[in-house]
Amino acid sequence: MSSLAEMDPVVPDWTGPLIPSGNLRRREIVSRAFTGMATAAAVVAVAMLVIIIFDVASKGSKVLSWGFVTSNTQGAVGGGIANALLGTAVIVAFASLLATPVGILTGLYLSEFAGASSRLGRFLKLALDLLQGLPTIIVGLFVYGLIVVAQHKQTGFAAAVALSIVILPLIARSSQEVLALVPGSLRDAADALGVNRWRAVFGVILPTAAGGITTGAILAIARAAGETAPLLVCNSVYDPNATQFNIFGHGVPTVPMYIFQAFQLPGSDPINHVWAAAFVMLLFILLANVGARILVARSRRKLTG
């Protein structure tokens, strides 16, 4: 009888307190280790950003002033960068007009109309991924052969087309991801009410995702504003001392080309101008990011209010 009692399994006490086992303790240690590593990586990334901003600001402060931003370039690097800022704004604005509607509609098609088995949808996703990873110098060379060679001159229009190709996949993919986050219950409710699909998309789904789409578009445009490679082959011939708004007839001064050309000049004064122009571009990107966050916050308040 005693041998049979010894063979009976031990029944655990389910009403007793939970005691962490060795496996649970190991998982807690691993979890804390990875959390610490992720936090350290985030701190390093933020620290690198702060170091870069401080370094650019300190080196550009020798030249940076209100007159540097509001006056035109004089000579090689004299004066300011007002005409380059206006040229950059005009080219980027035209590129945005070309790329933003196409990008949003492409993301809308992939998210709302292309099924999982759609061949066109799979092809579009592959094409967008390839365009997104394509070096911008190749985009510039493509536009050079397509437009510059045909017109026998470099123009701001060619640069805008090149930048629109850079912007397009970023806006399309970000729009697709944001639209995919819209709750499916909204689509089901629209279908249950018998609302036409296009009316549901433009009346319900797009307003819900408007904040995220706007954020993605602003970030894509801010990135394109600092591109130099497409401008180098499509918009590097221009009058650096003139303010140009006609992007179809000739080249237009831009800040990236100002930085590229001034960096090649001898002496310390051109380098100081380069750092000051770079700091202005950093401020532009910072303001674009802050503006995008404000738009997202306002959109969320409208949806929840």
Image: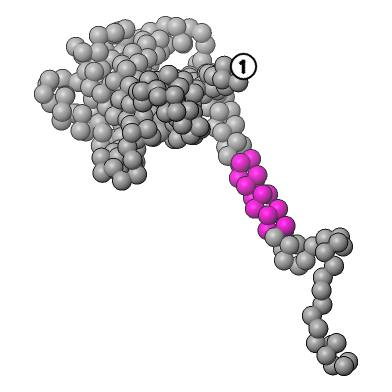
The quarter in which the N terminus is drawn is bottom right
| Residue 46 x, y percent position in the rendering | 60, 36
Residue at image location 28% in from the left, 35% down from the top: 137
| Residue 237 x, y percent position in the rendering | 23, 19
Image quadrant in which you'd find residue 231 = top left
Residue at image location 25% in from the left, 17% down from the top: 156
The quarter in which the C terminus is drawn is top right
* Residue 61 left/right relative to 153: right
Q: Nearer the viewer, residue 153 or 196?
A: 196
Figure check: 285 above or below 119: above
Q: Secondary structure at mark 1?
A: loop
Give the residue type that dot 1 points to: Gly
| Residue 108 x, y percent position in the rendering | 36, 29
Q: Nearer the viewer, residue 101 or 95?
A: 101
Residue at image location 58% in from the left, 28% down from the top: 54
Image quadrant in which you'd find residue 98 = top left
Q: Nearer the viewer, residue 230 or 3?
A: 3
The region drawn magenta spans: 28-44
Figure check: 156 above or below 171: above
* Residue 179 left/right relative to 41: left
What residue is disc 1 on?
305
| Residue 113 x, y percent position in the rendering | 33, 33
Figure check: 303 above or below 175: above
